[in-house]
Structure formats: C-alpha cells, structure tokens
Amino acid sequence: MTSTTAGIKLDALTKERIKEAAGRLDRTPHWFMKKAVMYWLEKVEAGAGVAEMLSETELDDDERLNSVLSRQRLLNAD
C-alpha cells in the first residue's frame, strides 16, 4: 500500500497541545494525529453522524462553519 501525505492547518496552540498529549503517551505527534483520524474514520464508517460526534453546543457552530451542504445553500441564495 502506498502512503501519501495529507496536510491540515493547525494553529500554534493546537499543535503544541498535540505535541504534549503525544508526549504523555510516549508517542510522536504523527502517531497521535494518525490514530485520531483512524478513530473518527471508523466511527463514521460504522454509521455515526456529526450529531453523535459533537456536543449540542458545538453542533450549531460546526454546522454553520463546516457543513459543505449549508455553505453551498448560502452561496446559491445570493
């Protein structure tokens, strides 16, 4: 299986939090991020939706900021 790099933009504080969390587990930040991605990927593949992954307070902001469908609706409304 061939591997490719997929980048994400992180602010400095989040990057430092990941580094610290990985260090507490005696793992690399790369390991930590890869495990996090695999964890959520498996949840979605098992049928979980956004509502199961976020708290109610996070859901409204996330829907507004990250929903591809919601953003397309806003663009088409103009």
Image (spheres, rainbow, N blue to C red):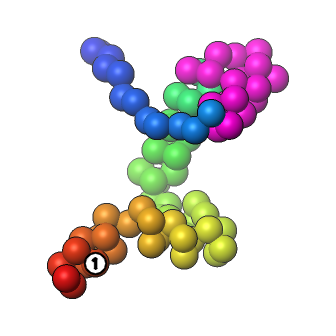
Of 68 and 34, nearer the camera is 68
Instruction: Give me the residue at 68% from left, 37% from top.
Output: 13
Chief secondary structure of the magenta span? Answer: helix
Residue 20 percent across, percent down from the top left: 76, 26
Residue 22 percent across, percent down from the top left: 71, 24
In the rendered view, tell whether residue 30 sits above or below residue 14.
above
Going by the numbered disc 1, the residue's amino acid type is Leu
Instruction: Give me the residue at 46% from left, 44% from top.
Output: 41
Could one spot residue 35 in this view of the protein? no
Instruction: Give me the residue at 81% from left, 23% from top.
Output: 24
Residue 45 counted in the magenta span = no
In the rendered view, tell whether residue 68 sits above or below residue 24.
below
Quarter holding residue 59: bottom right
Of 4 and 64, nearer the camera is 64
Quarter holding residue 70: bottom left
Residue 61 percent across, percent down from the top left: 54, 70
In the rendered view, tell whether residue 63 sits above or below residue 12.
below
